[in-house]
Amino acid sequence: MDRALAGGLLGPDQERYVLMFARGFSLIEMLVVVAIAGIVLAIAVPSFQETMVNGRSRGVAESIQFGLIKARSDAISRNAPMRFQLVSTLDATCTASSTSRLWVVTQYTGLTAPANTRGVPAGRCNVAAYVPPDQEEPCPATPAYTVNTSANPPTAPSCITDPFISYKSAAERVPDINVTATPTMGTPAGFIVTFGALGQLVANLEGAVPAGTPAYSVLVAPATGVTGRSYCVQVNSNGTTRLCTQACPCT
């Protein structure tokens, strides 16, 4: 405000008050504000980063728990064995894994003679989901299995080679999160859980049900050097699952 104008309209005390605030901030005042803002950011940013990591860890753990619950509920509703397996990718190059957050659930026809590998998704994780008829050998003559390998996602080349995928995890990458699942079985070593028609654990093609308690466990934790919370997903000997916020096993 112009000093002459201020003097004509305001008294001496009011003039000094108006002019003091009209001149803006001093350099010292600005430096104090910047310093305070820097301190606040130094405190808030690590906390925000840890919150983000915690959210990713929990999201991965809940995804794996959902897949296990889905496999068990499908086994009961379909009256057929269902297989949960961690896989390296969700494309046609997938292999068994014990450190991936990706998974597939397939209908498994059991151990027949010769060994029936239908329901084993290795190299076929890109195949479209297919719900077969409720029977031990689910390749029906009527209705005939429809082949469309050019579709997106494609079908298998034939019913006999279809892994009978029921459900897949999301494919998005999750940074700074490690997965460690035990025990492993098969070649390559993978984390595989098969549920029977009563929701119980049954043998996989790759091996028998583990005798430990819990039978299976998956540790989801921040990567080395990253601060955050760890989660454990465990499968109990009766087929039920549990999620807890700690290293495995849950207590």
Image (cartoon, rainbow, N blue to C red):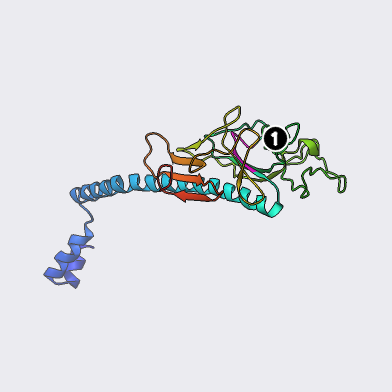
The answer to whether 237 appears left or right of 128 in the picture is left
- The location of residue 136, given as percent across then percent down, is 77, 44
Can residue 195 be seen in the rendering of this structure? yes
Residue bearing mark 1 = 124
- The location of residue 221, given as percent across then percent down, is 43, 40
Q: Residues within 10 Å of mark 1 (few under 14, many from 20)?
A: many
The residue segment tinted magenta is 83-90
Looking at the picture, does residue 22 appear above or below residue 174? below
Q: Which residue type carries mark 1?
A: Arg
The residue sitting at 72% across, 32% down in the picture is 115
Residue toward you, 65 or 92: 65
Looking at the picture, does residue 126 appear above or below residue 35? above
Tell me, yes or no, whether the highlighted magenta stretch contains residue 138. no
Q: Residue furthest top?
A: 187
User: In which image quadrant can residue 231 be found?
Assistant: top left
The answer to whether 209 appears left or right of 144 in the picture is left
The answer to whether 180 appears left or right of 171 in the picture is left
- The location of residue 143, given as percent across then percent down, is 86, 48
The residue sitting at 22% across, 62% down in the picture is 2
